[in-house]
Amino acid sequence: MSSDQAKFFVYTDVVDSSKTSIPEDIQVKKITTLQDWTLEFLMIAERVKEYTEIKKYYNFTGDGMFMVFDEYYDAINLALFLHHKLSTENKDDDTEKIALKMGISFGTSISFFEKTHNKYAPWGYSSIIAQRLLNLCLPNQILLSKGARDAMIGKVLPDWKLVLFDHIHSIGNYPIKHDKKGEEVFSFYGSMNDFNFGNASIKNFLNIDEALDFPNILKESKIPVQEFFILKVNQFKKQFSKIFTANGYDLEAEDEINFYKTLFYYGGSKYSGVSRFLPSVFESQRGGFLTSQEMMFERIKKDCQLKGIPIPVNFGNRYLIPDIDNLHADIRAKYYVCKEFVRRHENMHVQLFWVSPENAKNAIDSTTPSNLLDSRDVGLWHDSYAVRIEELHDSFYLSNEVTQNDRRRLIFADKDTDLYDSIKQYIEIMNQYITQGAAIRIDYKYLDHIYSK
């Protein structure tokens, strides 16, 4: 390997290999299993080198392996090979489950003679990034640097018939040691015919040391700035904690959108909600909410396509409960905005219905325990959690009176709470209205019918 050619740096190790609660013989078995799998991959690649032309460096790191490849497909083929081995190994109930982490970066390096192993070894910033990515990994996660991701755009793995870019997803900017700006990190995950690879979860954390380091001020000035920063964090935590109480919390618009993004990311595959918004108001005032819901649908749709299974017909229902005259007036006055609202729901397989305010109130009154008497909007991420939304202004749901100052309180409920049970009952009763003929489907046909009257 030449020192000026860009390469792919790969670190991989065994999760919890140094955990004291795990017997040492089991730890050693996991580590040697990773070594055996890695060497098996390298030997296979050598035997077919007329096809792969593999050029490599590898070394044992104690509980893992460090490797360098000249070609992208060798790094990714290794990841897939190891995860295929994992899927087989972990099916056996009699064996200790193995989880791996892997960090992959791309860039140049220099070589020096490493006396311990009596061979030349690569070193450079890119190899350090791969190790930092490894440290960020959740179990069975495969993380890539932006450089590695960019080098794989448009690439296909012929052996697996895999378009790489379809399986590489940004998970945000993360702090990297000695790099104040951080690095954009990408996760490689998906499904093959008989196994899954990678881990779609996102690691959320606050690195206190990084958060408190303000590099552009003098050292003696940092203490008061840091004290103020900690004070503000604690104040926000205290305020945000209201979201778990009956008082709720009034989120700023941008914070609310980001909060919903995380709820849809972790909330499973089905969401149902009830809203007093008119269609045009929902589309214009809560577009970020709908976009977050669309992202959930696209993620699940892609996963279904990878697995070769049908996309679910229904991802939940949304019920609008304004007065019927106001609904019709909104459709006539803002037909194209309402049509876009309907289009979004049709595209993400969410059925849209109107239920009369009277029937909605009857549904609320039928829930036990009754936690929804003052509720305006509710949302249910099935089998995960729910939110209750209260208006702060009487004018909030009227399209001709909505202002940027209109706000709402959010109350969050996990599935072990009475509030979650009440919201779930509320949605179930609304679902019954469909079969009873008490819910009107809002679709393109309905819009055109009302608009033409």
Image: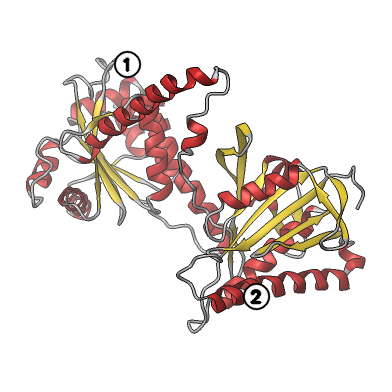
Q: Residue at x 76, y 74 (%)?
A: 40
154 over 173 or under it: above or below: below
- Identify residue type, mark 2: Thr
Q: Residue 347 appears at what percent x and percent y?
A: 46, 43
Coloring scheme used: secondary structure
Q: Say if residue 153 shows up in the picture.
A: no
Q: Nearer the viewer, residue 115 or 179?
A: 115
The outermost residue toward the bottom is: 94
Q: Residue at x 53, y 24 (%)?
A: 214
Identify the disc placed on residue 404.
1
Q: Nearer the viewer, residue 33 or 447?
A: 33
Q: Residue 63 appears at what percent x and percent y?
A: 64, 65
156 over 6 or under it: above or below: below
- Helix, strand or loop for disc 1: loop
Identify the disc placed on residue 295.
none
Q: Residue 451 appears at what percent x and percent y?
A: 33, 27
Q: Residue at x 77, y 50 (%)?
A: 8
Q: Nearer the viewer, residue 75 or 120?
A: 120
- Identify residue type, mark 1: Gln
Q: Residue 326 appears at what percent x and percent y?
A: 21, 25
Q: Which residue is mark 2?
A: 33
Q: Say if residue 198 shows up in the picture.
A: yes
- Helix, strand or loop for disc 2: helix
Quadrant position of the C terminus in the picture: top left
Q: Earlier in the sequence, mark 1 or mark 2?
A: 2
- Kindly report the distance in space between the C-alpha atoms of the residues bearing marks 1 and 2: 59 Å
Q: Residues within 10 Å of mark 2 (few under 14, many from 20)?
A: some
Which label lies toward us, 1 or 2?
A: 2
348 over 102 or under it: above or below: above
